[in-house]
Amino acid sequence: MSFRAFLVTKEENNFSRNVVDRQLSDLPDNEVLIDVKYSSLNYKDGLSATGNPGVTRVFPHTPGIDASGVVLESRDKDFTPGDEVIVIGFDLGMGTSGGFAERICVPGGWVVKMPHGLTTHSSMLLGTAGFTAAACIDKLEQSGMTNESGPVLVTGSTGGVGSVAIKLLSNIGYEVVAVTGKVDQHDFLKKLGAEEVVSREDMLDGKDKPLLPERWGGVIDTVGGDILFNAVKSLKYGEGLAACGLVASPQFSATVLPFILRNVNLLGIDSVQLPVAEKELIWEKLGSDWNVDLSELEVPFNLDTLSTGIDRILAGEMVGRGVVNLEE
Ligand SMILES: NC(=O)c1ccc[n+]([C@@H]2O[C@H](COP(=O)([O-])OP(=O)(O)OC[C@H]3O[C@@H](n4cnc5c(N)ncnc54)[C@H](OP(=O)(O)O)[C@@H]3O)[C@@H](O)[C@H]2O)c1
């Protein structure tokens, strides 16, 4: 049986993108075959589609690190045909044919049953980006952040992780300050729930100072580089920064001073290899206490329009969450 897929092909050092018909026999022989209803667009999909070797090495390849849909066949006893499910992370869309196709076939250990309160559509409006925003908040709260801690700074705020983080934080009672490089998006960020918006340039002030005035009750950082460490230097005593991204840089220069003088925490966030049991807990929160209407963030795509979205996310021009409808 054939199905439609977005396929990236490599010829010498050029990568071309096409929508093609593929066969089930093109998919890996894993335990759970899924009829994909929605996927979502993440920065990593852009890296995969352009042959970044840290993400995808073998072509032709179908990217898409996220998928939601309905189980068609399963050799894993935890799933039966008809179950609505979510798959994010692990090797999906990296070395394993991903969610930019009408079918995926994955190990049962990657699959989460759709929690009460979410649908195939709303779970992909969240996708890895929304899941990661929630994982950051969860880890910051586990390390002591509360509504009383002070303003929470969100960097890369018009992007997928950042925009969901703002909406979610403001919905659960936090004061949010957003960092953006887009001067024309301040109103959008305020409408999402940011009380204040600061520019990327302002976040680099004091780059050469060992410490900055204490300001943040928590930070969700999606960009890395000097912005990350300037934010660490402005954390309030005992508070933490959740580091999940590297769009500015994977490197930063640091001293131990904020850690030994202000008792602050630098927390790592990984949504990819996080064990599925821990993923389930975050998804359940997103379906219940942290359930939030993200429809204003949706940027709709289908397989035929997806390539433009990939270009936009790679150029840092995407605002909100790209949702890919596989049924269009
Ligand atoms: N650890 C994990 O498990 C995990 C999961 C998901 C994503 N991530 C990572 O998190 C990061 C964000 O992902 P995303 O899906 O939100 O990406 P995205 O939608 O592309 O958003 C990134 C945002 O960062 C800002 N930005 C772009 N270039 C920048 C630069 N040179 N310097 C500073 N800011 C810049 C832009 O926002 P503004 O213009 O508003 O500043 C952009 O919208 C990526 O590095 C991604 O790989 C990690």
Image (tube, helix red, strand yellow):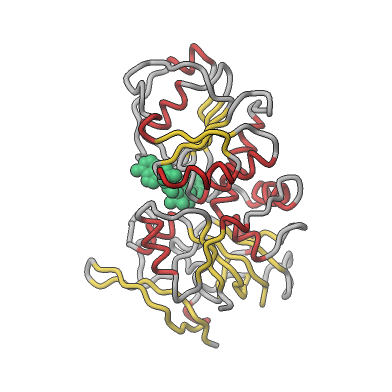
Query: Which residue is outermost to the left?
Result: 12
Left or right for 283, reference 10: right
* Residue 20 position within the rendered picture, expressed as x and y whole percent measured from the top left: 42, 82
* Residue 252 position within the rendered picture, expressed as x and y whole percent measured from the top left: 35, 31
Q: Which quadrant would the N terminus be assigned to in this image?
A: bottom right
Left or right for 114, reference 153: right
Asked where in the image residue 44 lies, by quadrant, the reply is bottom left
In the figure, 65 relative to 286: above or below?
Answer: below
Residue pictured at 36% horizontal, 66% vertical:
58
In the figure, 115 relative to 16: above or below?
Answer: above
* Residue 276 position within the rendered picture, expressed as x and y whole percent measured from the top left: 64, 52
Query: Which residue is outermost to the bottom?
Result: 1
Asked where in the image residue 138 lies, by quadrant, the reply is top right
Left or right for 139, reference 310: right
Nearest the camera: 10 or 29? Answer: 10
In the figure, 321 relative to 140: above or below?
Answer: below
Note whether residue 246 is visible: no
Note whether residue 293 is visible: yes
Asked where in the image residue 240 lies, by quadrant, the reply is top right
* Residue 307 position within the rendered picture, expressed as x and y whole percent measured from the top left: 40, 69
Residue pictured at 35% horizontal, 40% vertical:
249
Q: Which quadrant would the C terminus be assigned to in this image?
A: bottom right
Nearest the camera: 20 or 320? Answer: 320
How many labels sit on residues? 0
